[in-house]
Image (spheres, rainbow, N blue to C red):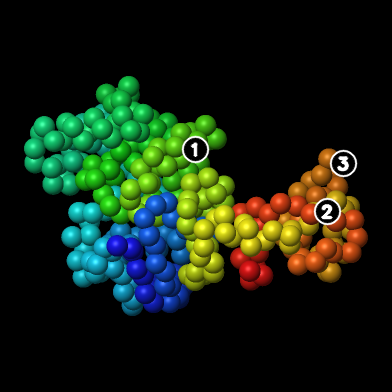
Amino acid sequence: MNLIVNNLNKRYKNGVTALDDLSIEIGKGMFGLLGPNGAGKSTFMRILATLQYPDSGHITFQGLDILQNRRDLRMRLGYLPQSFGVYPKESAKFLLHYMAILKGSSSKKQREQIVDEVLELTNLTDVQDKFVSEYSGGMKQRFGIAQLLLNRPSLIIVDEPTAGLDPSERKRFLNVLRSVGTENTVIFSTHIVEDVRELCNDMAIINQGKILNHQSPQKAIDDLRGAIWQTNVSKAGLQTLKKTHKVISENYGENNDRSVRVYATDKPSGDFRPAPPTLEDVYFLTQDGSK
């Protein structure tokens, strides 16, 4: 059964509205929640993880009212926050055994089995006796995945996990996350468009606490086919172009001019060539209300 969120609202004491009547249904597989910093992603993740209460709204997972049954939800939950600390001078193996006990594992034999499984899955077996506090950023994130799998969760929440990782560490982390996302509901919050394109079979774009677009990444891209155009202009020409066209993004071209992507349902006048749409195009257009 799916995760179903109805009319979720959260307003902080400083007047900031983090969630604004948010409703969404999320099924099995990798779900990407894409949005800029401050869009409401982390508030939504913390509420789903039962670490915060909304002002109003209703959430069920597998038929369970999670706001009324927080303890039961936590038995099914694996959670990796945006940042987390570890005890210094303790090894990964020790900490995983300790966390397994906290999650209710009373059998030493079962703990040894599950700890060995998650260490192997996250490629940490060879460094299991090293202090986690001395791990690299990518290794710490993989340790975060290992700890959330200790109770064999059916709902996994991962909040901004690749922020700050170098490209090679990011790839290793995404491969680990991909391997656990087939049989569970995995909610993956990020502001990195490429992460969602690589990982997710479903996604939503959020800003100012509202869901702006909810569909599969491929469907979102397909909807823009034939409507993305590209040209090169000078810096001065770019300002003129912005007055007459829907400019999505701009980058420096080969001769220090600007390579510009625009949205138009028909070919714009001028020296434009068709361009294949990307998820980044979807993201920018959704954020400014064009899609």
Q: Tell us which disc is closer to us: 2 or 1.
A: 2
Taking the spot 42% from the left edge, 59% from the top edge, the residue there is: 42
Residue 52: numbered disc: none
> Residue 252 at x, y = what percent?
79, 46
Tag 2 and tag 1, C-beta contact below 8 Å: no
Give how far across and how far down residue 172 sits, in percent.
Answer: 46, 34
The residue identified by callout 1 is: 170
Q: Give how far across and how far down residue 270 sits, in percent.
A: 91, 60
Amino acid type indicated by mark 2: Arg
Q: Give the Cα separation between the discs numbered 2 and 3.
A: 18 Å
Classify mark 3: helix, strand or loop: loop
Q: CA distance from mark 2 to mark 1?
A: 33 Å
Q: Residue 75 occupies which quadrant of the picture?
A: bottom left
Please report whichever mark, 1 or 3, sits nearer to the chain's N-terminal start: 1
Neighbor class of circle 1 (other Cα within 10 Å; few <14, some 14-19, many 20+) is some
Residue at point 13%, 36% (across, down):
110
Between discs 2 and 3, the one toward the N terminus: 3
Quadrant of the image for the N terminus?
bottom left
> Which one is earlier in the sequence, the residue at label 2 or at label 1?
1
Q: Amino acid at mark 3?
A: Asn
Considering the image in quadrants, where does the C terminus appear? bottom right
Q: Quote the CA–CA distance across marks 1 and 3.
A: 32 Å
Secondary structure state at the residue bearing disc 1: helix
Residue on which the image places disc 2? 273
Residue bearing the label numbered 3: 255
Residue in the picture at 55% in, 49% down = 197
Q: Are marks 1 and 3 in contact (CB under 8 Å)?
A: no
State left or right for residue 71 relative to residue 21: left
Is residue 249 in view? yes
> Residue 5 in the image: x percent, y percent?
36, 70
Q: Amino acid at mark 1?
A: Arg
